[in-house]
Amino acid sequence: MNFYQNLKTMSLKTMKLPLLCLALAVTYSSCSDDDNIMPNPETAIVSVFHASPSTDSLSFYLDAKKVNAKLVGLGDSINYIEAFIGDRVAEIKGKDGKSIFQKSIKLEKDKAYSLFITNEKDKDDAEYVQISDDLTNPAEGKAKIRFVNVSPDAGKLNLAIAGGADLFTEKEFKSATEFKEIDAKKQSFNVVDPASKAVLFTLENADIKAGKIYTIWVKGLKDTEEDALEIEAMLYNNK
């Protein structure tokens, strides 16, 4: 199954950026003879995650086009959007419309990416962590899962099946694992401090379905007095 067939099997949550120029080009080509038919544009897909404790609710822009319909808060995500390949300008803006952070990201043809917004411990400046996504299907009856640590002060983290074995160990801040196949069933996952063996958070009763692909990502702070900023594991359905 090729990339575009894979995209068709993804849920309707996958969105496309408004491509006005493309629409005009297609309209024009439909009025021309067959020799002038425009080729399909070369694209990639990108999802976005707000994991920056120092950054309030925000809006995300790609090449100056606003992607989200409503403000994106800490722990929220934007489902896959389609974008042209090459160097694209990714920008986040605050509620007041002022720019918070801007940087070019590189997108390659037929690739999928996750873009995490985070910040270093004791620093307020936002930054991006760009990760490639392998959306090839799991084996029959299985699901795939990976682990991303974007908690600025938690240090290295393990992800374990509650009451069972570790799935991933000692993942540092701003790092991600490869996808791993697991059994498709309801199960809970523990985020564990590998040094103290303390369970920092439990993601309870996650409904892991056969044929699906998931990311468990950890945001927030281990040491904070603000409930809204406490460390938490989030489950994202990539496909």
Image (cartoon, rainbow, N blue to C red):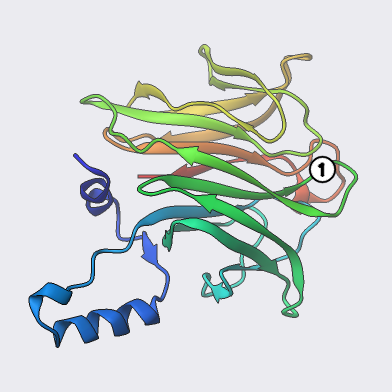
From the top left corner, tell me how far across and down residue 13 is, in percent: 36, 60
Left or right: 2 in relation to 32 = right
Corner quadrant of residue 131: top right
Q: Quadrant of the C terminus?
A: top left
Tag 1: amino acid: Glu
From the top left corner, tell me how far across and down residue 199 is, in percent: 69, 23
Q: Nearer the viewer, residue 160 or 121?
A: 121
Report the residue at 37% width, 22% height from top: 181
Q: Nearer the viewer, residue 120 or 196?
A: 120
Corner quadrant of residue 30: bottom left
From the top left corner, tell me how far across and down residue 204 is, in percent: 52, 34
| Residue farthest toward the front in the current orientation of the protein | 35
Q: Quadrant of the N terminus?
A: top left
At label 1, counting other C-alpha atoms closer than 10 Å, the crowd grade (few under 14, some 14-19, many 20 or more) is some
Check the image and report above or below for 222 versus 73.
Answer: above
Q: Secondary structure at mark 1?
A: loop
Check the image and report above or below for 129 versus 89.
Answer: above
Q: Which residue is mark 1?
A: 120
**Taking the image as drawn, is residue 50 in sight?**
yes
Q: Nearer the viewer, residue 51 or 81?
A: 81
From the top left corner, tell me how far across and down residue 21 is, in percent: 38, 81
Left or right: 62 in relation to 73 = left
